Image (spheres, rainbow, N blue to C red):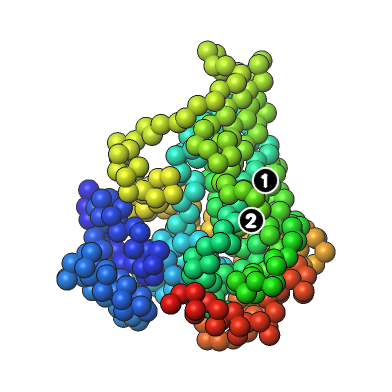
Amino acid sequence: MRTVKIGVFGIYRGGTFYDTIRYNNGEIVAVCDKDEARLAEAREKLGDDLATYTNFEDFINHEGLEAVFLSNYFCEHAPYAVKALEKGIHVLSECASNSTMAEGVALVRACEKSGAFYMISENYPFMKFNHEINRIVEGGTLGKIMYAEGEYNHPHDPRDRRYNASLRPFSQHWRVRLPRSYYVTHALAPLMYFTGATPKKVVAMPCYAPFDQKDKQNYCQIADRAAIMMVLNDDDSVFRVTGCAAFAGHENSYRLCGTKGQVENLRESNHILLRYNEWDAPEGVSGYNCYLPEWNDPDAEAIDKIGGHYGGDFLVMREFLNCVRENRKPKMDVYFATAMASVGILAHRSILNGNVPYDIPDFRKKEDRVKYENDHLSPFWGSDGSEPTLPSCSRPEGEPLPEKLLEYDEYAKEMLK
């Protein structure tokens, strides 16, 4: 197994992959981050020969760099991915491939021109229970998948003020203005991965419940607690998914219903519940099955030890490095990623525009690219300080209040001392 020379951009998150990269015969030759202290920590962990950069242009010009892992801010991946692809460097990118529709078009065009490939670093399809769900779906015993649910629900303990401030360290941080539908990858990607279905239409509704504005830590939280999205796919199946929801209680759960049977992970549990119609159950299999799945993988010990996210981090990185070595395109490629990002972006527009449905573009098609190539609408502050051009909440009064932002900055600074 040949070594792949890889660089890591954004090492607060990227640094959690060091052991996984090295175990899978990746050589971390360069890292890039604006924080000098983190760069020093990386040298201590990876050795003095490690090249460290604070400038991305210098980083991607590092000699011999084959691939990059982008783990910078959620809303800023696409421009850096485009630059890497233009250099012929393979890209593994965290979270969302693009935060505007125009970025999605630019990313697809750059990937098609490049000799390198793009893969979204979506780890949830590879979690232990989802690994088992995928095995069952691939086995075909559920029949045609007609309906599926994906929930990513991640409320935060208001008592842990320092941690909450670290998630929103300043008032122009991306999490401050993150619409609930945008972080759709953890809910939607597993369903797309298991079934091979591609979203074609989305309609969405918000769950509106304002936070207590007497508490300063809530000055920078939008009042939508979840976005409930209904997605119609190219195979006529329907998905119901959340974005990053914040209702009680914490969970990642998935359910797939076929013509013969259905499978799900039990909420806040690794257990699998597999059920069949009695007349459709495979020979020798009960109509009701509840069990804890096991890894059937030669790297099982390492997956559990260093994988992170129930093994998902390990397996998504292993898949990426193997794709580089074998010169094959990944399943979660640029079209998979931009379709998923489009669901999150256009679901928010559905919410803002009276819950009307939106067609999901196919960026393989010229007419779909032309439609969105100049669509730069964004709920986020730009890295250049430019103001958001879209609301982040379903109601104006649920947005972070401008007069409270300075107060929040002072509060967060105090919490993070």
Q: Quadrant of residue 85?
A: bottom left
Where is residue 330 drawn, in percent x and y?
Answer: 43, 52
Q: Residues within 10 Å of mark 1 (few under 14, many from 20)?
A: many
Q: Quadrant of residue 266?
A: top right
Q: CA distance from mark 1 to mark 2?
A: 16 Å
Residue picked out by circle 1: 239
Q: How many marks?
A: 2
Where is residue 396 drawn, in percent x and y?
Answer: 77, 74
Q: Secondary structure at mark 2?
A: strand
* Camera-nearest residue between 275 and 261: 275
Tell me the mark number nearer the camera, choosing from 1 and 2.
2
Q: Quadrant of residue 179?
A: bottom right
* Camera-nearest residue between 230 and 157: 157
Please identify the residue farthest to the top as the structure is shown: 284
Q: Secondary structure at mark 1?
A: strand
Q: Is residue 78 left or right of residue 11?
A: right
Q: Is residue 202 visible?
A: no
Q: Is residue 16 visible?
A: yes
What's under tag 2, amino acid-wise? Ala
Where is residue 274 drawn, in percent x and y?
Answer: 58, 27
What's under tag 1, amino acid-wise? Phe
The residue at the point 80 percent across, 60 percent down is 355
Please identify the residue farthest to the right as the structure is shown: 354
* Camera-nearest residue between 216 and 340: 216
Which label is found at residue 245? 2
